[in-house]
Each structure stands twice: as C-alpha cells, then as structure tokens.
Amino acid sequence: MEAVNKRLLKTGDIKNWDKTTLCSIIGQDKGNAIEYATTEWPKHYPDNFSGLSEKWESLVYRYLPRKDHFDLAIWQEVNGTQVLVALALGNPSHARTHLTVKWIERYFGEHYLQGRALWPILTCAEEYAKLLGCERVLIKDAVDSGKYRRYGYSDYHHEHVAHGGNYLGKELK
C-alpha cells in the first residue's frame, strides 16, 4: 500500500480514488466479487465485448489451491453503493522468476476510476512480485498492449512456452 499511496500522491488525482478498496477476489470485504462480475458486469458490456472466455468463478477456483497466486478485486463506493471496478488473477512461475497476470477485466459501468483501473492492478502485481523475489511481471495475452506500454511493459519472449501466448513484460528493480 505504501507504494500505491506514493504513486497516487504524485499524480494529484486523489479525489478519484476516494472510497476505493483493494482486496482479494475471494474475500467478502466489500461484497461478493464473483457474483457481481457475473451478474452486474454483463449489463454494461460494450457491443464489441461479451466477457472473458472463461467465467471468473472457474478461474478463481482453479488458482485458489496455489497459495502464492495473485488475485485482486478493486471496489469503489459510488453514490453509496459498492461497485466492483476490476478483477485480476495470475500466479508466479515455479522458480519464482516471474509473476504472470493472466486474467484482467474491468467494469464498463460508471465509477470514478474510469480508465484508471489498470494502474493499481499493475502496481499491486509489481509489489507482490517483489515480495516473492521475482525478476519481472508478465502480462499474458493483453487485449490492448498500448495501455501496458504506458506503464513500462514491452514485448517479452517467454522461452519456456513453446506453443503460444503473447506476453508483455517489465523487469523489476
């Protein structure tokens, strides 16, 4: 949180982050993230998007047994109601050389972080990767690589993946 707060204060955009909570997808801190993503998000999908190829519930329960997985839910209170702004899920490599964020989705409805949800996801992933001793963070199959490039990510060739996967990577200091 210290790293997130430091970056946040630098931008001067603090009012947009009011009443924002970063927590686990599986926690019930602000609400049931899986249920919210399943029922509320599709109501606001743009015409050219119908959700991820897999349901969040099956993704989360696939990663749950691995204790060091990365999962993040971003909630924000909007007009007195808790709104799930974004979800992210991934895991570190077995050798812990990198943390791969494999699934990211955001809410297309109204909230104060419009267009800014990726920043806390990447910040949290980078800080978690540092805690694990990883050398880099990878993003698998990014929908819009330009958005990640703004945060220092670039094309990454994953030498241990023989058959596919497009990766963006950022080396950690």
Image (cartoon, helix red, strand yellow):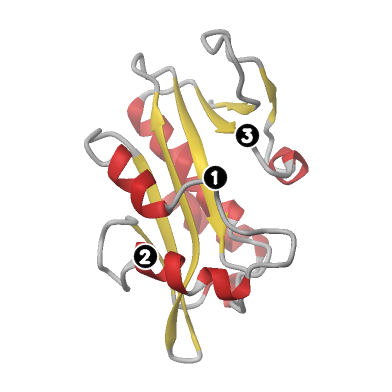
Q: Which of marks 3 and 2 is nearer the N terminus?
A: 2
* Disc 1 crowd, CA 10 A, few/some/many (<14, 14-19, 20+): some
Describe residue 39's horizontal placement relative to residue 46 as left or right: left
Q: Which residue type does callout 1 highlight?
A: Leu
CB under 8 Å between callouts 2 and 1? no
CA gap, disc 1 and disc 3: 15 Å
* Disc 2 crowd, CA 10 A, few/some/many (<14, 14-19, 20+): many
Residue 33, image quadrant = bottom left
SS type, badge 3: loop
Q: Position of residue 102 (x, y in %)?
A: 50, 37
Q: Which of 75 and 37 is in front in this view?
A: 37
Describe residue 101's horizontal placement relative to residue 143 as left or right: left
Q: In this view, does 83 lie above or below 163?
A: below
Residue 33 marker:
2
CB under 8 Å between callouts 3 and 2? no
| Closer to viewer: mark 1 or mark 3 | 3
Residue 108, image quadrant = bottom right
Q: In this view, does 30 lie above or below 6?
A: below
Q: In this view, does 4 lie above or below 169?
A: below
Residue 163, image quadrant = top right
Q: Nearer the viewer, residue 104 or 148?
A: 104
Q: Where is residue 94 in the image (x, y as percent from the top left)?
A: 34, 17
Q: Which residue is drawn at 44% across and 72% down?
A: 39
CA gap, disc 3 and disc 2: 23 Å
- The residue where tag 1 is placed is 122
* Disc 3 crowd, CA 10 A, few/some/many (<14, 14-19, 20+): some
- The residue where tag 3 is placed is 141
Q: Where is residue 55 in the image (x, y as percent from the top left)?
A: 43, 52
Q: In this view, does 51 lie above or below 138?
A: below
Q: Earlier in the sequence, mark 2 or mark 1?
A: 2
SS type, badge 1: helix
